[in-house]
Amino acid sequence: MIPGGAQEEHVDATEILVPLVAEATVRIHGVEAGNPFLGSGFFVAPNWVLTCAHVVLAEGEEPVEAAARRVSVGYGEKLLKGVVEWAEPAARAVTGNWPAPDLALIRLLDHVDHPCVWLTERTAKAYSTNQVVYFGWVAGEGQVVPYNGHCTVSGQLGVGSGGILRLSNDDEMPQGMSGGPVVDLVRGEVIGVLKARRPARDGGLAVAIQQLRRLPADPGPAGDLYHRVMTAHDLHHADRHRLVPNHEFTWTDAHSEIGAATGRALTPGQRTHLLGMLAQLPPPAGTRGLLDVVTEVRGSPAQGLPLAPRAWRDGLGLLYDLRRGTVELEAVLRYAVLAATADRADGAEEQVERALTDWARQTAAAAESLNRMFRNSLDTQSRARLRARRLISPVALSVPAGAAAAPRPRAEAQLEIIPRGWEPGRYDWRVCVVPENGEVDCVEEDFHGTGLADLPRRLAEPLAEAFRRCDEPGYVAALQLAVPGALVAFAADGWYLGTGARALGAARPMAVRRTDPPPDEDPDLAEERHGRWRTLHHRPPAPVVLDCDEAAENPVPAEEELRALPRETLPVLCRSGPAAPEALHRLTRSGYAVALWRREPVAAEHVCADFHRGTVRTVRDARTAAGLPGALARLRAAVADGVPEAYWSSGLTLLYDDPTRPLPGSDELLETP
């Protein structure tokens, strides 16, 4: 009740949010005669429009690379020129559907002042049943008109990183709405992109906004596209909240009006200001570094993420689902300090870092719920991290020429292939991330049986997500291919996981691991494997071709002879391709965890001198066994580029079965290398 006994007026979120969203929703047109209407889209950042891939890659237009396709964007009475900067997928699937993410980013070529929607920063693992409103344009009676409707999120299709939301059938979804925004009316933020109606079924489908994290991580000339767009988005809203040009009603105002921050640590103004400051920092040093910061703040890793965070705003969104044991405001303020003082590949402006740490300290001082000990800890942690960062120099981290550096564990991706014995030619699989500590985080798995020909397509996105979580600036994560001994010749290094992509083995380091349990019941044999592994990683390996004298095949030595070879011996198999499972099993029983061999069979009359010389040169250049995965990736890239001097290495494969980092399910004890 309000004074005088009058009833307090109910706030209608639809009435407040609809004008903001409608003003930022645009029409997508083709560029040929008449500019035919294709669908809808919306401004997500200055000069950037988000829509669906199937809208901008519509049928009827001549085939052309997505990144070169021109479109027109209808905004008010204007038709603006635009170019499709990114679209995924690049074409309709053979089934006739457009699989996830079905998103596209359009870069405007005509500069115009325009509003932008507010994109959620949350990483939702499941979606609430809050009412949502969707927007778009529809063609009718010779003109294109705006349209909006109400519904709820009634579920989520698929598992893992699919990110397809099922919408209820509360309202009609006419043709042309695809590519429009879906807005959560309770939180006041865009959570999805309308994708499709469901013919002869209820409601429609939308793509979760976090699917934008699937943008390629390789930075272009202007920088990483995901960070470019999200930085521009957050600065747009922060600037308008701070300056409020022409007394316009902003998204931050709307969040205050509808009570979107009720029960949260930050007011809408604080949230907008914080996101604007985070946007001015250089991007995190890779997804792995960002997850480490989030884990430090939360006290435990964020589990079950469909798509890992990539920007500082994404990490902030992971703090909104904290439960007992952690105060949300404490977590947010500590996160701000850690982000401001993080190690960086590129330097940040000192005043930006200082403004963020000052904001955290001032916000903590003004919060009555936070005690003096916590406030003091923010200042202490900030000073300690900055001091430690100044002490780290490239000189201190360099390795003297000629010295063999001990390997430092790094995060790696892992693909486990499991043959279905009762269904020949079909495989179960699991994609995981193996962090530095050896603990395994499953990204996605499928135990329904996938045909061999379908594996590259089915594994493309899970592997891409695993690589995003592992790669860092200057570090391309390796892929461990974990297979039973019978599948050691599984040629996954030749897979192409996307249009225009390089073969998997040419794009990143890759090595084979055996899922068969190692024969280490004998303590002496276990020590032999660990000892040989340590030696090969601290001394230059000595490659020894075991089965060939450059012109004729020789039998692989017996186990007793193999065990007698010096510990720096690196076994090389030249002519044992067809018998690789048996030969490698013999090496494993003899205490070897690293070996080179080539998959393709060699004709009896073939002279192998080039292979022998090439392996010696490759091992020498790698310096230690730790350099072999990268050395093979460079050779595969050279073969793919048509470098004749690298052809000798076709089919060259690496067994790299680290005994200090057992595969999941192994009972081996960890040992520091």
Image (tube, rainbow, N blue to C red):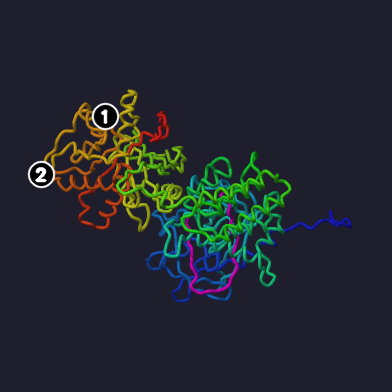
Residue 222 versus residue 371: which sits nearer the camera? 371
Residue 36 versus residue 621: which sits nearer the camera? 621
Distance from Cα at disc 2 to Cα at disc 1: 30 Å
How busy is the neighbourhood of tag 2: few (under 14 within 10 Å), some, or many (20 plus)? few
Q: In x, y percent, where is residue 211?
A: 50, 54
- Residue 182 shows in this picture: no
Name the secondary structure under disc 2: loop
Which mark is drawn over residue 514? none
Q: Is residue 193 above or below residue 418?
A: below
Q: In x, y percent, where is residue 288?
A: 47, 47
Q: In x, y percent, where is residue 274?
A: 62, 57
Amino acid type of the residue that numbered disc 1 sits on in the rendered structure? Ser
- Residue 12 shows in this picture: yes
Name the secondary structure under disc 1: loop
Tell me where the magenta segment starts and ends, as one range: 101-123
Residue 140 versus residue 486: which sits nearer the camera? 486
Between label 2 and label 1, give the one nearer the viewer: 1
Q: Main secondary structure of the magenta part?
A: loop
Residue marked by disc 2: 605
Residue ID at (46%, 43%): 443
- Left or right: residue 103 versus residue 398 is right
How many dots with numbers? 2
Q: Is residue 108 magenta?
A: yes
Residue 238 versus residue 354: which sits nearer the camera? 354
Amino acid type of the residue that numbered disc 2 sits on in the rendered structure? Glu
Residue marked by disc 1: 590
Q: In x, y percent, where is residue 651?
A: 24, 46
